[in-house]
Image (cartoon, rainbow, N blue to C red):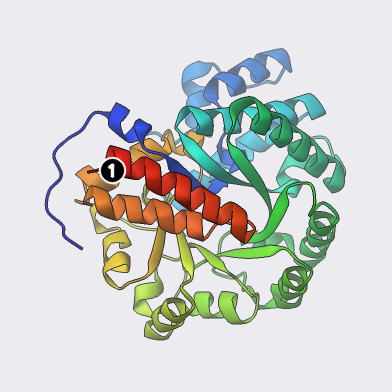
Amino acid sequence: MNSASISARPIEFYKSLPKVELHRHLEGSLRFETVRELARSQGMNLPGTSQLRGMVQVQDSEPMTFENFLSKFSTLRLFYRSEEIIKRVTQEAIADAAADNVRYLELRFTPVALSKAQGFPLGQVMDWVIEGAHQAEKTYGVTTRLIASVNRHEGTTIAAQVSYLALERINDGIVGLDLAGYEPGFPAEPYGLIFASAKEKGLHITVHAAEWDSGDNIIVALEKLGAERIGHGIRILDTPEAVEMARQRNTAFEVCVTSNYQSGAVVQLKDHPIKKMIEQRLNVTINTDDPSISQITLSDEYRLLCETFGFPLDVLRDRVLSAARAAFLPGYEREKLLLDLGEEFHSLIR
């Protein structure tokens, strides 16, 4: 990849580019204005604006660690207190994607997280997310599909339940199953049968792997869980066998640069391996992860990669098209998306 410096462009240029997002968590997408409003309207005993912001969004003055990043979710889980709220935050997440010119969005959500505050049944919160997403898709014109996510520490009983409920809703916009969470101490192997069975029955599979632990976890995700895509995967370069396997399968990597830095998965932003991953011919896509927690948009990530990492625009375009090819869509819908994106990039990048 040519790493020549890219001249600075206004953020409006990056906003004008058509986008595909494969890795965005609903729970990390709550607008701060909505958080503040709900804290008041729900009578929640939370501090004022300045302190509250630090509880739900990463601040430059904070340590960039997993513990600090994870603490934001602990606060955000307090807000899912009604059907109306869950539908609202789903619609707002999709509206924000539309405002950033995202044409295709896969929004993943964790039913356990959404149900915790009020003890809602998992299937019920899944239905509320589906209804909110359907309405927002019509209103904002963003093609949106949903991925049900489970965390490694939640255990296989929860995973089996979420998988069963997702399969029941496979015709309502839930297209995939995701295994997320902190890797050390929580191996993926126990989830193998659940995920492999879900894939056999029609769900697509994506797995967070090699974000915090070795590239061996990618091999497990591909061979044991049937993963078609890998969330993050930034430690893969330390495991040549995983690199070769991912190349052979053309496995897409859902890379989230700013999030990886803020969560401490990489110590220095400049040392993020995304450029090396592309140079090693790995199928990299660009994503936000948790845009509100990180206080970013996908446009911000595109500008970061071009103006800090030196990505030429044609490489950026190729990463967007790679994301479209990796979308959990039927073939004819994927081809239409690729055609539309290709034509629009042709008119913008000459």
Residue at which label 1 appears: 304
Q: Is residue 62 visible?
A: no
Q: Is residue 178 left or right of residue 49?
A: right
| Percent of width and height locating residue 314 | 26, 52
Q: Residue at x 48, y 38 (%)?
A: 102
Q: Amino acid at mark 1?
A: Leu
The quadrant of the rendering that contains the N terminus is bottom left
Instruction: Name the foreground residue: 307 vs 187.
Output: 307
Q: Is residue 200 left or right of residue 101?
A: right
Which part of the image, by quadrant, shows the C terminus?
top left
> SS at mark 1?
helix
Are there few (<14), some (14-19), or many (20+) residues within 10 Å of tag 1? some
Is residue 295 visible in this depiction of the protein? yes
Q: Image quadrant of residue 114? A: top right
Residue that appears at 76% across and 72% down: 194
Picture quarter containing residue 302? top left
Q: Who's the residue at 60% across and 82% down the image? A: 223
- Point out residue 239 in the picture as x, y percentages from the top left corner: 39, 81
